[in-house]
Amino acid sequence: MNAFPIGVLLILGATPLVAQTRAPAPASAPTRTYTNNVGFSYTVPSDWEVVDMGSTLPGAQQQAQQQASSDQEKRGIGCTQMGLSARYGSPASTVVAVVLPFACLGSEMTEKDLSGMGEGALEGVRQNFDLGEPQYGAYSLGSHNLWIERVIGTLKDHPKAQYAVETVCGILKKGAVCWMAIAADPAALASFEHCIVVLDDEAPSALAPANAFAKKPSY
């Protein structure tokens, strides 16, 4: 499974929010907890502003499909959903989640695909950022194994703007999910890692533990 479309949609969702000097005001006050029927929910901190990115997804999918190299990739792009997007602070930090339901895809992914998902996300980031050397880690939340990557990047159009780009990917019973943070400072990165998630109705926990990078991925 080529997970590059996940990376494209992640970065197309997150980068515009980083570039804005002011977040658009949502039409209504959306909840800060996002729930998806593939089997997970996550809650962003109360001081982050939820931003409706639904109107941007079709354009992002169209752009990603133009880069697709196979029918399978195009199908994956069409099946990909963008979850809750949130923005905080100035300069802006953002959080975006992207979901790939297996029922739509027509096949399942496994833990062996986690590194490919993460690497695909990194390729998407390279469109807009100059990146340093990535750091990788692996950890478990309940019965789920997650893959995590962190890299320092600078916006190509704003070389003085440095961010920590962190991506977490996991496989659920009904789909795959990747979360991405583009964090302007350590506090924003910590807020992302402390977001509360529920995976397949298991116990709530922080998205990334303090020792997330202590173990290297074996998949």
Image (spheres, grey):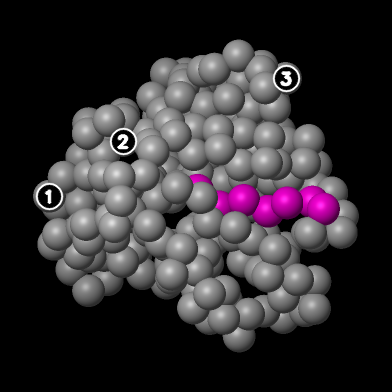
| Residue 99 within the segment the image draws in magenta | yes
Q: Residues within 10 Å of mark 2 (few under 14, many from 20)?
A: many
165 left or right of 217? Answer: left
Residue for point 65% across, 38% down: 170
Q: Amino acid at mark 3?
A: Ser
Question: From where the camera sits, is residue 183 visible?
Answer: no
Give me the C-alpha separation between circle 3 and circle 2: 25 Å
Instruction: Characterize the magenta stretch by its predominant secondary structure.
Output: strand
| First of labels 3, 2 by sequence position | 3
Residue range highlighted in magenta: 97-103
76 left or right of 96? Answer: right
Q: Quadrant of the C terminus?
A: top right
174 left or right of 77? Answer: right
User: As rendered, which of 50 and 70 lies closer to the eye?
Assistant: 50
Residue 133 spot, x, y in % from top left: 41, 50
Residue found at the far bottom of this picture? 66
According to the picture, the residue beneath numbered tag 3 turns out to be 143
Residue found at the far right of this picture? 107
Please tell me whether residue 54 is drawn above or below residue 199 in the rendered image: below
Of marks 1 and 2, the one in the foreground? 1
Q: Amino acid at mark 1?
A: Ser
Of the numbered discs in the image, which one, if any, rests on residue 90? 1
According to the picture, the residue beneath numbered tag 2 turns out to be 189
| First of labels 3, 1 by sequence position | 1
Residue for point 77% across, 79% down: 70
Give me the C-alpha separation between circle 1 and circle 2: 14 Å
Residue for point 27% across, 71% down: 156
